[in-house]
Image (cartoon, coloured by chain):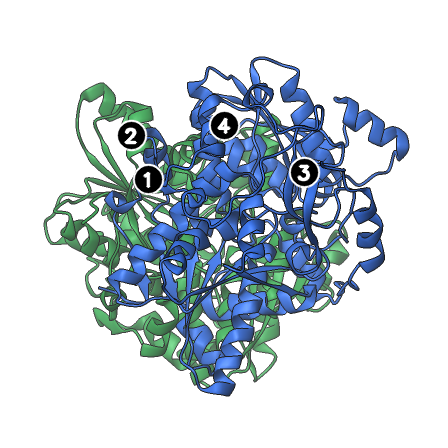
Chain colours: A green, B blue
Amino acid sequence: MDKDRVYLDKSEIPKQWYNIMADMPKLPAPPISPITGKPVAPEELLAIFPPALLEQEMTDKRWIDIPDEVREIISLWRPSPLIRARRLEKALGTPAKIYYKHEGVSPAGSHKTNTAVAQAYYNKEAGIKRLTTETGAGQWGSALSFSCAQFGMECRVYMVKVSYFQKPYRKAFMKMFGAEIFPSPSELTNAGREALKRNPDMPGSLGLAISEAVEEAAGRSDTNYALGSVLNHVCLHQTVIGLETQKQFAKIGAYPDMIFASCGGGSNFAGIAFPFVLDKINGKKVTAVAVEPASCPTLTKGIYTYDYGDVAKLTPIMQMYTLGHDFEPPAIHSGGLRYHGESPLVSALYNQGLITAQSVPQLEVFSSALMFAKEEGIVPAPESSHAIAATIKEALKCKESGEAKTLLFCLSGHGHFDMMSYEAFTDGKLEDYAYPEAAIAESLKNLPEVK
Amino acid sequence: MDKDRVYLDKSEIPKQWYNIMADMPKLPAPPISPITGKPVAPEELLAIFPPALLEQEMTDKRWIDIPDEVREIISLWRPSPLIRARRLEKALGTPAKIYYKHEGVSPAGSHKTNTAVAQAYYNKEAGIKRLTTETGAGQWGSALSFSCAQFGMECRVYMVKVSYFQKPYRKAFMKMFGAEIFPSPSELTNAGREALKRNPDMPGSLGLAISEAVEEAAGRSDTNYALGSVLNHVCLHQTVIGLETQKQFAKIGAYPDMIFASCGGGSNFAGIAFPFVLDKINGKKVTAVAVEPASCPTLTKGIYTYDYGDVAKLTPIMQMYTLGHDFEPPAIHSGGLRYHGESPLVSALYNQGLITAQSVPQLEVFSSALMFAKEEGIVPAPESSHAIAATIKEALKCKESGEAKTLLFCLSGHGHFDMMSYEAFTDGKLEDYAYPEAAIAESLKNLPEVK
């Protein structure tokens, strides 16, 4: 067996997802309805989500069966490989052992496809014909487009306007799988029209694109909404990543001391980390590190409170770390991490001291990505490269201390659709944004009141 | 063992390349010098190639050792997986078994990296500090950029001008690995300047870009030239593909009846097919099919004669199938297959009836690609999709006849850098070019005279 490139058989794809709500010392407070100011009744959400996903959102069952149809589709790329980055270790001169779980092998090129397939499946089962969603960098929109195509469903994607024009390849990818793509803000929704009235040149934001997609889904009975991160059921579906990784480490008789994963809305981090957090709850020594951009530092600089998930205040109010729902993050080239909030589950675990967090500035992210690409032969997504940067930093600490720690990071996606960002970096056109302290302080003034 | 996704261990990467010159019934005639009109003396080529590659170009030794340094680098992605396309089979309703060898997993996203690493290695060994090359679609330039970075060598790429502007992601990829890229025709060489004088808006061609790269390499002692296809040593390095595939089929107790590979200069076809052609020579029943674009049908419509490899007539005159060195193929979205000539080895095998050929029109290529992407979850390169189209056609024949043939194709690369071509297709903007009969007839009038 090749211990540096650990494959599993299709039969070893997990048969169940792991639900960390069964094991957390304290659950996040229930989401609050933006209309009634009281905990959201499941019926309110049935306008945009199918019953099976709502149940997953709230259940405390530890293990949830993965439907066979979902396992069959994800078996196109799962189990994904666990790879030892020998050449990176050598280039760093570190005694640390560096492993990465390669989620970039999925059809849409990132971990997002894991939950996209599941969400399309449950919506199809519920008789839904059409899904709406938002996308920033395009990973999530790509994943949902692919997944809808598998079930013969229509897919409409509101793509943050600045990304729509910066990332034509992502748009083309989604069209290839039959999706309709609109730049957000659009003229198709009230939220979009109002934003355009305020500022016709508004570049868009994830929060606003969510508002548009939710508004459309809420208004049509054949249409539901799908979210690519933040929510509990999304984190749940991503746990296949960590569960496979545990099997792979067991095969080679190793176990990670530290786990690094980039963290925007939180689903990538949840996916690789939650199964290991269970180990930690059960007494194992392992540190999971959520890595976020220095210019959008939700966990490391935000506050733990209640906030909306979107700009137009259409979503439930959630207990989470937030920078304020109207905070507009600087235009860093990691669109997938430009989100003001954070998964309530990841937030609660962080608040309870079960996980840690770090932030990394943009230029360090890109120089780490280039090093990884040269040594390991894979161009990583800028989002994933946050985890690479943090891993490299830790590996260099090991070099100082002489510790041979086992480090794991999640390579959540490839960067083939991010080449213009890489060119901006090699051309010296990228910058490190100053920590947007004033903008965050300002937006934190507008948090909703919750009794 | 998973019989639908066949992995090999790193230790199973072939230790030797297979040289078909040891086994061909009749070798191609030796290349003719464009200056003397006589067979090229090795010394003439030493200005642009290192001795080790020249030796490989001419040797009749059957097995050539792969240097450890080369094996170590290609082990980043090799052995590449052999995958059964179960969902494609099902969608086609065919009794045929369809397998594909996935070369898109390489750092530059195509099979080209196999020879790029080897060529960079031998040049480095010979004290060369700098390589020049041409690239059309960008796969070869990307592969050589990555490979030069591995050995700390400089890399200068002349990129066909129309591709330079159509494929900014490819350019960015090459820059990421430190290469210099110039649109061809450029002002840097005589060949480029003369072409620009004739037509300042000339969109460029592979043949002209070759002229530029060769001219620069010939004029500098620290610089050599590297070619991504056509030549014998390039075909040799690609045989790792077929050799691995044979091991993989042996593991699952199967063997292909037919092998499909796209064919431009010929190295991809050579890579997967040559080891199986040896089987055929030894009496096994297997049909290897070179698949080319209907608008650049070198094998299926060209003639077997002597011709230059480039527009400026700087390269040796080779015995091969050709459409004439000044034939400018229609602007199909498969830049890697827009070449007037053909590997002399592939040409000789075709002429001797040991392999067959087919051509496919552009729209069929793209619709086959979309079907494959949806069913198998991988966006293929348009070049590779020629093989997919031919495989699908054969699978549908099997559906008619009820034969359960085993079909193999080489997925020579992914299409992540070709998304604008896919968008042109989904937007209905691509066309099937008429067979360019008149242009070919015209250019075949300008063949060199060889005594």
| Residue B54, label in figure | 4
Horizontally, residue B92 falls left or right of residue A211, namely left
- Res A442 seen here: yes
Determine if marks 1 and 2 fall on one subunit.
Answer: no
Q: Measuring from the top left, give residue B293's x and y in whole percent.
A: 66, 59
Q: Measuring from the top left, give residue A81's x and y in whole percent.
A: 30, 52
Q: Secondary structure at mark 4?
A: helix
Q: Nearer the viewer, mark 3 or mark 2?
A: 3
**Which chain is indicated by disc 1?**
B
Q: Nearer the viewer, residue A149 or A32?
A: A149
Q: Quadrant of the C terminus of chain B?
A: top right
Look at 15% across and 47% down and name the residue there: A252
Circle 3 residue: B309
Q: Amino acid at mark 2?
A: Glu
Q: Amino acid at mark 3?
A: Gly
Q: Is residue A338 above or below residue B121?
A: below
Circle 2 residue: A89
Determine if marks 3 and 2 fall on one subunit.
Answer: no
Farthest left residue in view: A283
Q: Distance of mark 4 from mark 1, alpha carbons?
A: 17 Å
**Which chain is indicated by disc 4?**
B
- Res B381 seen here: no
Q: Distance of mark 3 from mark 4, alpha carbons?
A: 17 Å
| Residue B16, label in figure | 1
Labels 3 & 2 near each other (Cβ < 8 A)? no
**Which chain is indicated by disc 2?**
A
Q: Nearer the viewer, residue B209 or B61?
A: B61
Look at 30% across and 37% down and name the residue there: A85
Q: Secondary structure at mark 2?
A: helix
Look at 49% across and 46% down and name the residue there: B109
Q: Distance of mark 2 from mark 4, alpha carbons?
A: 36 Å
Q: Residues within 10 Å of mark 1 (few under 14, many from 20)?
A: some
